[in-house]
């Protein structure tokens, strides 16, 4: 005798002939779990029927069109559900459609080259934003301020880089093309310090205008978004200038990197900065050191990474520096309570 198991419940027992009848009628599936009552052996219904020399054959319920008619048009094309607009309440559906279909829009609309690069960069930014929102959001995080931080960062970068020419005002930039250790100084005090400070400007404004104390994880999230925004600006610039001078394979790889991993790195560095900026606001007695750390740690990680990337034999160490940055951010967040206890004194 055979017991059939479905949804953690056993039915039966049935002899093999009765089991075959149920299978042929579609009430029991050949793939259902089953157990022999006598031997306690467990396997599928199909296995026990085959062992008994029985071969199930489920008959068709009419021809194709008869089956389609029995299924019904509403199941195939649920017009009433679509017309009732119930699907508008399904945020997962709308988000899935937005992510999946966004790039196809640009296949139909004749955007200029720069517009295409920027739009695709925004597309990847949205994906990163959703990822960060899932892992780092707090009750203080809002879509409004997320968008403000994102586009304010880009406006700040555009103004400082393209209008003011801020990078030319930092003399340490001149050291990046020199041998080590001068290039490390240039990448840290020039590139790293300048870029990390610029990315943090919206965070300074946000925390100054906040109507309640912002917890570190909230500033980490907004820092991540500011970093992604900088990555979009920088990525578009590289894709339309430096990357065009590379061979096809190199250009393809660097274009992908400029949309994925490199904006992620900028986000992690700025997220670390946001963490210490939040603590500087929560514990103003230590604000000098905390503001210093909010810039020094990201700039140092940034400078180390850029320096090591200049040497092909050291690229794996550069990747290790990236991992350390992620590890630091996650450790900071986990140890936040301990830091607060320390800073209360």
Image: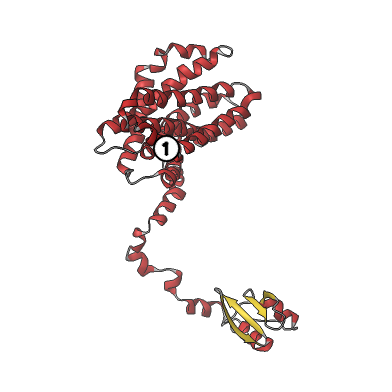
Which one is in front, 40 or 2?
Answer: 40
User: What residue do we see at 34% from left, 29% from top?
Assistant: 280
Rendering coords of residue 113 (x, y %): 45, 32
Rendering coords of residue 19 (x, y %): 64, 85
Q: Secondary structure at mark 1?
A: helix
User: What residue do we see at 66% from left, 85% from top?
Assistant: 20
Q: Is residue 102 visible?
A: yes
- Identify the image quadrant of the N terminus: bottom right
Residue 151 location, quadrant:
top left
Query: Along the horizontal axis of the image, is 202 left or right of 6?
Result: left
Query: Along the horizontal axis of the image, is 227 left or right of 31?
Result: left
User: What residue do we see at 43% from left, 68% from top?
Assistant: 77
Relative to 272, does residue 6 appear above or below in the rendering? below
- Identify the image quadrant of the C terminus: top left
User: What residue do we see at 56% from left, 11% from top?
Assistant: 178
Rendering coords of residue 44 (x, y %): 67, 75
């Amino acid at each position: 005798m055979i017991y059939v198991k479905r949804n953690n419940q056993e039915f039966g027992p049935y002899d093999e002939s009765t089991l075959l009848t149920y299978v042929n009628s579609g009430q029991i599936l050949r793939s259902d779990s089953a157990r022999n009552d006598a031997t306690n052996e467990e396997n599928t219904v199909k296995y026990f029927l085959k062992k008994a020399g029985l071969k199930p054959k489920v008959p068709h319920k009419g021809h194709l069109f008869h089956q389609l008619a029995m299924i019904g048009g509403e199941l195939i094309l649920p017009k009433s559900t679509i017309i009732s607009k119930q699907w508008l309440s399904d945020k997962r559906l709308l988000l899935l459609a937005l992510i999946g279909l966004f790039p196809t829009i640009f296949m139909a609309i004749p955007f200029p080259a720069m517009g295409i690069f920027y739009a695709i960069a925004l597309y990847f930014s949205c994906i990163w934003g959703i990822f960060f929102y899932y892992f780092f959001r707090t009750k203080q995080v809002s879509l409004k301020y997320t968008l403000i931080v994102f586009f304010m960062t880009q406006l700040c970068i555009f103004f400082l880089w393209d209008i003011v020419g801020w990078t030319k005002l930092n003399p340490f930039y001149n050291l990046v093309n020199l041998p080590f250790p001068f290039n490390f100084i240039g990448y840290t005090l020039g590139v790293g310090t300048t870029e990390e400070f610029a990315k943090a400007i919206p965070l300074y404004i946000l925390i100054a205008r906040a109507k309640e104390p912002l917890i570190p994880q909230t500033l980490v999230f907004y820092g991540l978004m500011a970093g992604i925004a900088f990555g979009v600006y920088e990525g578009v610039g590289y894709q339309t200038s430096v990357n065009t001078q590379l061979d096809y394979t190199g250009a393809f790889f660097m274009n992908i990197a400029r949309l994925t991993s490199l904006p992620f790195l900028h986000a992690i560095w700025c997220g670390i900065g946001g963490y210490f900026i939040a603590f500087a606001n929560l514990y103003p007695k230590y604000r000098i050191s905390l503001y210093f750390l909010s810039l020094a740690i990201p700039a140092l990680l940034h400078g180390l990474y850029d320096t090591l990337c200049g040497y092909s034999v050291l690229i794996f160490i550069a990747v290790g520096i990236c991992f350390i940055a992620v590890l630091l951010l996650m450790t900071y967040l986990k140890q936040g309570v301990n830091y607060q206890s320390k800073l209360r004194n």
